[in-house]
Amino acid sequence: MSFSTRRSELKSISEKLLKIAEKFSDFSMVQLYNIKSATTRFGENEITQNVELNETRASVTLCRDKKTTKVSIDKFDDESIIDKFSKSSVLLDFQKEDTEFPDFPDKLEVEQPDNCYFDTTANITPDKKAEIISTHIDKCIQKGLLASGILTNSEMRFALSNSKGLFGYFESTNASFSTTVMDDNGASGWSTDNNPDIEKIDFSKVSSIAIKKSLLNINPKDLEAGKYTVILEPAAVTDLIRFLSLKGLATQLYFDGRSPFSNKLGEKIFSDKITLIDEVDNPLAPGMPFDFEGIKKQNIYAVENGILKDLPYDLAYAKKNGRKSNGRGLDYPNSYGPFFLSLNLRPGSKSLEQIISESDKCLLVTHLHYTNLINPNDLTITGTTRDGLFWIENGKISYPVKNFRFTQSIIEAFNNVIEISSDQIVKSAFFGGKSIVAGMKISNFNFTSKTEY
Amino acid sequence: MKDYCQLAIHICKKLGAEFADIRIIRINQEDLGVRLGALSNIENSESLGIGIRTIKNGAWGFAACSGVSNEIVENTAKKALEISKASSKKIKQKIKLASEPPHIDRWCSPYIIDPFKVSTEKKLNFLFELDKILRDDKKIVNSLATMSFLKEFQWYANSEGSYIVQEILRSGAGIEAHATNGHEVQKRSFPCSFGGQYIQGGYEVINSLGLLENAEKTRKEAVDLLDAKPCPSGEKELIILGSQLALQIHESIGHATELDRVLGLEANYAGRSFVTLEKKGNFKYGSDLMNIVADATFPTGLGTYGYDDDGVRAQRFFVIESGIFKNYLGNREFAHTVNDSRSNGCNRAHGWKNIPIVRMPNLSLLPGDAKLEELIADTKDGIMVDGVKCWSIDQYRYNFQFGMEIGWEIKNGKITGMLKDTNYQGITPDFWGSLNAVCNEDYWTMWGVPNCGKGQPGQRAEMSHGAAPSRFGKVTVGVK
């Protein structure tokens, strides 16, 4: 199927939904998705699950006299649509008029980005994926190791339309390979890669890194919990940026007075080494060029050289604050407000390897596990290290260390940054968006307890 | 729907499947929310689709598609078999399902008032009334009152002759308030965090929760927390109230005893488990007061069903008895790995689009004989905590740390004040080994967990945990 056929297919369903919605509303908006996703999962050196999903779903917002209701459906015959719209529109009668009702746009001029959709990813077969996994598993068997992980390919098509005439379409593919490798005693290593084009994933490299880490992680030593200088590999930094986006730089929290950064726009909040940009057009990770309200996305400097510069805005928050939306609107209405969904960390000048080689008496962290926010007032998160925690001495990995639990304020950590690496990885974010993150060397990282594993 | 089920099984058999099952599922859901005096969410959703699972050449295949028609059934069945064949290229041994007799049955969860027939006006008026009480203080910067109703119809058939129809209705509601003094934020929820309490049942559930009676207290506690003492640091006796203890059970016992984790099949994502196979029947998981029962038959639980998604009849069994680990949570595929001749019925999938995986049913700490008032009076230097705020546990379910919304300091048998930013940390068997009192059935409640995530691709499951306030000795609290 060509791009224009795929686009036309969703446009046709969207138009049908909008046409029927006319009978029940004076304004309507349709989000229509088609998702095809297939995951081959392996564990203990064999394929253990292998699944495929094909789903078409619409979320329709019906508005009348500035009152709103939403209905979500996956049956698109006239009778089903009329039945659902009819039942849902009854809910409009019991509502108050929304005095802040946004002025939704009537047109959207955006192009489908060139490098988001690849037939290679959309069309890879279960057989081919089994071959790729078999190659990796056989390498692990040769080393006496156990492999587990996933190889996923997905295709997402999305159409946004409204009754004022707006129509926007975006499609993307994504392939992801992730593996944990361990010996019989649990010495584990991990690695991952993802790309819109499955042919650009270096499966051999991912496999080799996970195997190498597992072999380096044999017989980890006990260290006492406490404050250490750490080098977080990019995958570990992702967790910190995710919580910063959702719990620190969220617009509703900011204006409610529930963010630790409330009233601090324009102020220095982090080390001047930190710059975070929510980008639409970074070639490393292109994403959907418009938001869920039909506004074209702009690049936003959230934090520049440690200074809080801007927030994500949807139509409602833009109106309240006398400015324009910067294209970060989510489903309307919602109870959480707009978020940054793909914050990129500006890289530093030294490679991770160089940072390690210049370091002494510190810990190298592969990635983090089960991170969660324990205190919103200073953005303290807790979680554990995983799949490779190593003691660095005289610029080299000296020995593996048993995993730690950390209890660490993100604000404090981002003020204690010593270096940011030039190495970057792309991590999948919400809805086709991706974050580009780099490694970080941070002083006084707070490890609060240890574990036997 | 029966015709579609029969068609799927017929096609799979014809194409050489050694085993096949199909689930056709329709879910109707209604979600309502009021935030700071305005409607924040009002959504009705309906989802209908099929999931077909096959074994061919000894390997699993699974395909799912939205909608139901002869064409969808045929294409999905063929796809599942194609996937089975691909899977069989890298397996160590062929899938061996524990035997289960074919069942032809219909099962429904009980309810009194169908929430989908209660007027929206009544529901919204109630939420607006709650929200008004919650925000009646200038220090309140966020208030939220929510309701959610879900009705699921499932048609299941397999190639061994089972045909089971199930209908499940669950309802839930909750309130929360955030207060600030300009320097910090504190939050309280009722009856529990993350959307409130969820129970199998109809609109009568909403009427039973006591939301109106507790809205003012919820608001006041959020405001009072701003001036409360910070949680002290050190080792203290710890009394954990019901909803927090439910999550402790969920994270440190439920997930730890899922057989797929133990066998290493979740290693790349949520992790493995410290409860390794040799521990069955002899491992001292906790103190003698610790009796943990898995019970998919207990009325009102979110993990209550007639049959699991393997078509296995719901069961009740001890996971831990008098502190000794007895049984894993399993399914037909893994029963043989622990020498069980029959699955204990814990295989479930979220909706039609996911493959069934090992899931907790209702998992509860059986009540003891203590009374909360006596427990407090018997505590010299401790804290009491409630309200889930944060949870985290390592990949072996061994080292955990939890944060709560609220706490109270106990000195010499008396509550001496409110505490904020409470947290505790522990090692699973040490922590449960320190369990020294469990309150009796008068204090025991089934707490619903409607949002448990697991698996790759990730899927959600619902279950409940029965718990009464319990006391643990010498727990590390106030981690900084």
Image (cartoon, rainbow, N blue to C red):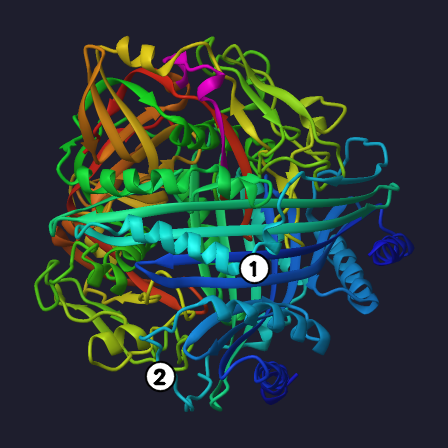
Is residue B155 one of those drawn in magenta? no
Q: Residue B441 magenta-drawn?
A: yes
Q: Which mark is residue A152?
A: 1
Q: Nearer the viewer, residue A43 or B150?
A: B150
Q: Residue at x 33, y 65 (%)?
A: A337
Placement of B480 over or under A417, stated as above or below: above
One can see residue B308 in this view: yes
**For the point 56% across and 41% down, which residue is it?**
B204
User: Where A205 falls versus B308 (above or below)?
Assistant: below
Q: Which of the marked residues, 1 or 2, is nearer the chain's N terminus?
A: 2
**Residue B390 in view:** no
Amino acid type at circle 2 is: Asp
Q: Which residues are magenta?
A: B432-448
Q: Amino acid at mark 1?
A: Thr
Q: CA distance from mark 1 to mark 2?
A: 39 Å
Q: Quadrant of residue B380?
A: top left
Task: Confirm whether circles 1 and 2 share one chain.
Answer: yes
Q: Residue at x 30, y 33 (%)?
A: A401
Q: Secondary structure at mark 2?
A: loop
Q: Pointer 2: what residue? A: A103
Q: Nearer the viewer, residue B101 or B146?
A: B146
Chain designation of label 2: A
Q: Residue at x 52, y 64 (%)?
A: A175
